[in-house]
Image: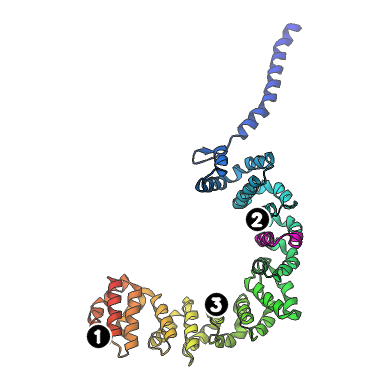
Amino acid sequence: MRYYLQPIQRKLLGLTLLLLLLPIFLITCSAVEPSYDGIPFSNWYRRLFGEHERTQERAFNAMVEMGVEATPFLMKKWEATENKEERYVIAQVFAQMGPNALKAKPLLVEGIDGIDENMIAYCAQALGSFGEQSADVTPMLARLLLTADFTTQIKILEALGNIGPGASEAIPRMMEAAQRSRTRTVAVEAMGKMGSKTVEHMMGWLQDGTSEQKLLACQVLGEATGNVEEALPYLTEAFKDKDPKMRVAAVRAIGRTGPAAIVVLDELIQALNDKDKDMRRETIGTLTSIGADAAGDKMLDAMKSNNGNIREGAIQVVMRWESVRDRAKPILITRLADSDAGARYAAVLALSNMGEEIVPDMIRLLSSSSVQQRGAACTVLGNIGRPARKALPRLQELRTDSDSYVAKEAQKAIDKIS
């Protein structure tokens, strides 16, 4: 019996040893360092703390490129050191990796639960880079807005903004931060990323807030990613305010409502003549957002307004709408002789953007009796460049035009086309 058991025992012993060694083998295989550009992780890590800034930068980028494969090795480095400067750098690498470093989340949560302001800032930044997957950390980040210094608060607000709507429970704390001068801008941007909850909270400020709070509400809604139509009646009131900052913020927020802003179209057209240039610029953006389907006819009429600023602004809006291009063309050609320099310049840009299709019209215009039209046509053709080479013979003739402005513009056009 003994002689028959020995081979079986040997096989069992071999199998047992294999089972014992297999995990070690697998661990060894799984612990193989990742590499980048043929250089292993450990070498890059040493360079991350080298003397030369350029070497550090390259090592940092290499860590980020190694991504998810480098994350467990960086976590081991974090756990193996008590050097806070070293951990700062690792946290910054995690922040650049984004979701690829998600496994490091527990370490980063520990980092924001301490008293080191720099550690809190760097770890918050990394947690924010995970987006919605860090939504569960929102309460901790929100509490830190009450105690952290201003520099750290900025990083926390950026993190909350990157988390997005999942961090909307922190909006009350962000509203407080928006009323502090040092954190206002970042808080406004962060709240704009909170989705529909942002509008709900801003309605309170728009209805019953102080002038400062109403301004902040308009600024937040101007950054909002959610639907802000609910706030349109209050934004319309703010749009009429005497304070230029309030008007600018309100018209930007109105632009977020898109076609719904058609209800204030006439007021917006008149705002193209506002004395504040920022107001005029934001109004152009808001009118554009309404769209050609809803506002096309009115804006084409505005290109014929008696007011130069309105004509100029209307041209800038219409030139962004492909669907009304053909209807706008004859008006734009007329505007090349506009008495207002701004309207003329806007018409030149709009026609130049039409490219080769407008070349025949511009060649005909080179024979216009209007000095302004001849000169502007030369400018348009020059802006179009090589596709306008059919105009070269006529442009050559205009080099000796009786008007020096036309002759000069003709030569410029020839140089650009040739």
Mark 3 crowd level (few <14, some 14–19, many ≥20, 10 Å Cα): some
Colour style of the rendered protein structure: rainbow
Q: Magenta region, mostly helix, strand or loop? A: helix
Measure how far apart labels 2 and 1 are at the Cα level.
64 Å
Report the side of 393 relative to 37 (left or right).
left
| SS at circle 1 | loop
Residue type at mark 3 is Gly
Report the side of 133 relative to 57 (left or right).
right
Report the side of 318 relative to 224 (left or right).
left
Segment colored magenta: 142-164
Mark 1 crowd level (few <14, some 14–19, many ≥20, 10 Å Cα): some
Determine contact: label 2, label 1, CB under 8 Å.
no
Residue type at mark 2 is Gln
Q: Nearer the viewer, mark 2 or mark 1?
A: 2
Q: Which residue is mark 3?
A: 285
Magenta segment includes 152: yes
